[in-house]
């Protein structure tokens, strides 16, 4: 069974819907929960706990059934690992030198070819080699452990019950909860631990047990700014709270609930302005995603995780190693390609033309019907005009070769950079035609509030977030889950 993370659906691409295991019979009678609530309780906290227990029992039964049914597991594994296995017999993409005029490459053979004709012939032969093989990466077999390790159901503890409550609050039924989602929410909550410790502890200290007052709002303003929420977002939240205080007395519990609503609204506003609220590769169409950003933000690592996410979600993917200036960048991309079983188009020459690599990658993707091309671009400072122009050149190549492709330009931001990351977003948005942001390194920072600053001040939708160093620690952004993880006690 393939879980499509882009569309948050348990139906696999091959048509395998997730069949609920007969752990309990009461799940079918479970009443639906209204989306947007802060807890899944139908009447009180005991009902929420019973709901979580039932979800845990179903997941445990599903996991036990999977362990005792190896033939069904074997039917799915080859589909997921097909790109990885195809790497092993692949031949190197470098074409052999033509030894005689009797071996045509592109068109009829000629007894003597000019320099330009030989270059064009070699280019055509290289492209033919890329498209003929299942994978153009002449690499060793893919190590299965980093990418193929499935999530395991842990203990029935506070972490599980919190994760189940967050899913139920979004309208999920007991039989719709998947272990993939529970695993990710656990990682997200752990990743935001540093931000939550600094943010929530100060927030609760400021709110106390008394109703909200103007003095409390002043303290809340300081807390929000320290978490890098940004001036504009902070003003917007506080203005809404002040308007509420003018009409009624607000106790701390209601104040936190109202604060969650305001933060979610800030994050959702730029997403609602997009044509596609959920960013996912479109079926039957070439999708090209360019990853841009300054050096050191985790751009190449993010690309590798996105490739793994695409393969695990049932999409075919290809990586263009267009960061040809940084030392060992191509080798790093190839390692990530091996881990995810995704072919990599690269030029091993030093300082090769990035646009030429993208040209080859798009040609190979079009010939093989690949769903998604991920382009790793060179890191650049937002103040370097010539490097920004190089990025624009890559974008023009994409538009020329694949005018019907769905193109996304995603800025990778390091959450630990705080307001400097916001300035990068503003500069790249004007120069690179950004369509979204990938926020990384949330696990190593107490500045998770920068997500709110990017959404409110740069007006950019956050599309993916990384909350750890593992290959599975990157997932599509969900504002409800993010705010709940940020403000959970």
Image (spheres, rainbow, N blue to C red):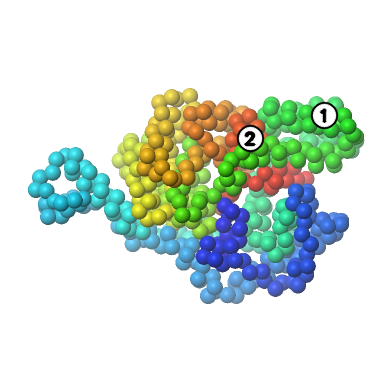
Q: Position of residue 313 (x, y in %)?
A: 53, 57
**Residue at horizontal 71%, vertical 38%?**
265
The kind of secondary structure element at disc 2 is: helix
**Residue at horizontal 67%, vertical 29%?**
230
First of labels 2, 1 by sequence position: 1
**Residue at horizontal 81%, vertical 32%?**
241
Q: Position of residue 282 (x, y in %)?
A: 50, 51
Residue tagged by mark 1? 242
Q: Is residue 75 left or right of residue 131?
A: right
Q: Is residue 189 left or right of residue 407?
A: right
Graded by Cα atoms within 10 Å as few (under 14), some (14 to 19) or many (20 or more), the crowding at tag 2 reads many
Is any part of residue 347 visible from this angle? yes
Count how many numbered circles sit on residues in the image: 2
**Residue at horizontal 40%, vertical 55%?**
369
Q: Is residue 269 left or right of residue 157?
A: left
The kind of secondary structure element at disc 1 is: helix
Report how far apart the C-alphas of labels 2 and 1 lie in the structure.
22 Å
Instruction: Point out the image quarter for the N terminus.
Output: bottom right
Nearest the eye: 322 or 202: 322
Is any part of residue 326 visible from this angle? no
Q: Position of residue 451 (x, y in %)?
A: 64, 37
Nearest the eye: 303 or 201: 303
Q: Position of residue 53 (x, y in %)?
A: 77, 63
Instruction: Point out the image quarter for the C terminus.
Output: top right
Residue tagged by mark 2? 455
Graded by Cα atoms within 10 Å as few (under 14), some (14 to 19) or many (20 or more), the crowding at tag 1 reads some
């Amino acid at each position: 069974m393939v879980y499509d993370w882009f569309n948050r659906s348990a139906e696999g691409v091959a048509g395998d819907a997730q069949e609920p295991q007969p752990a309990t019979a009461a799940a079918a009678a479970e009443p639906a929960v209204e989306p947007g609530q802060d807890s899944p309780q139908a009447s009180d906290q005991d009902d929420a706990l019973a709901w979580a227990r039932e979800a845990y029992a179903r997941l445990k039964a599903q996991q036990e059934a999977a362990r005792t049914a190896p033939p069904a597991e074997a039917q799915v594994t080859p589909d997921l690992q097909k790109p990885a296995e195809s790497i092993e017999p692949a031949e190197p993409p470098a074409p052999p030198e033509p030894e005689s005029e009797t071996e045509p490459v592109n068109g009829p053979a000629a007894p003597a070819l000019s320099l330009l004709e030989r270059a064009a012939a070699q280019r055509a032969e290289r492209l033919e080699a890329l498209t003929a093989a299942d994978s153009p990466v002449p690499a060793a077999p893919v190590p299965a452990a980093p990418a193929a390790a499935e999530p395991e159901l842990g203990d029935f503890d506070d972490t599980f019950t919190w994760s189940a409550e967050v899913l139920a609050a979004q309208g999920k039924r007991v039989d719709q909860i998947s272990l993939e989602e529970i695993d990710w929410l656990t990682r997200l909550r752990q990743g935001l631990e540093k931000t939550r410790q600094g943010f929530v502890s100060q927030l609760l200290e400021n709110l106390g047990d008394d109703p909200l007052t103007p003095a409390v709002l002043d303290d809340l303003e300081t807390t929000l700014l320290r978490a890098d929420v940004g001036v504009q977002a902070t003003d917007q939240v506080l203005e809404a709270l002040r308007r509420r205080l003018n009409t009624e007395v607000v106790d701390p519990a209601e104040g936190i609930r109202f604060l969650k609503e305001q933060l979610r609204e800030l994050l959702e506003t730029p997403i609602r302005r997009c044509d596609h609220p959920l960013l996912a590769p479109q079926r039957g169409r070439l999708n090209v995603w360019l990853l841009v950003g300054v050096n050191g933000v985790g751009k190449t690592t993010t690309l590798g995780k996105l490739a793994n996410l695409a393969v695990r979600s049932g999409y075919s993917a290809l990586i263009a190693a267009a960061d040809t200036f940084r030392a060992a960048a191509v080798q790093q991309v190839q390692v990530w390609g091996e881990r995810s079983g995704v072919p990599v188009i690269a030029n091993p020459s030093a300082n090769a033309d990035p646009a030429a690599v993208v040209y080859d990658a798009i040609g190979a993707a079009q010939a093989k019907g690949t769903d998604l091309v991920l382009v790793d671009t060179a890191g650049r400072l937002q103040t370097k005009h010539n490097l920004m122009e190089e990025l624009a050149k890559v974008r023009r190549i994409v538009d020329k070769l694949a005018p019907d492709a769905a193109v996304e330009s995603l800025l990778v931001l390091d959450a630990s950079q705080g307001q400097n990351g916001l300035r990068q977003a503003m500069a790249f948005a004007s120069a690179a035609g950004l369509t979204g942001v990938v926020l990384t390194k949330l696990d190593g920072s107490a500045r998770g509030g920068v997500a709110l600053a990017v959404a409110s001040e740069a007006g950019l939708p956050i599309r993916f977030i990384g909350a750890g160093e593992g290959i599975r620690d990157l997932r599509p952004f969900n504002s409800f889950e993010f705010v709940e993880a940020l403000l959970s006690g």
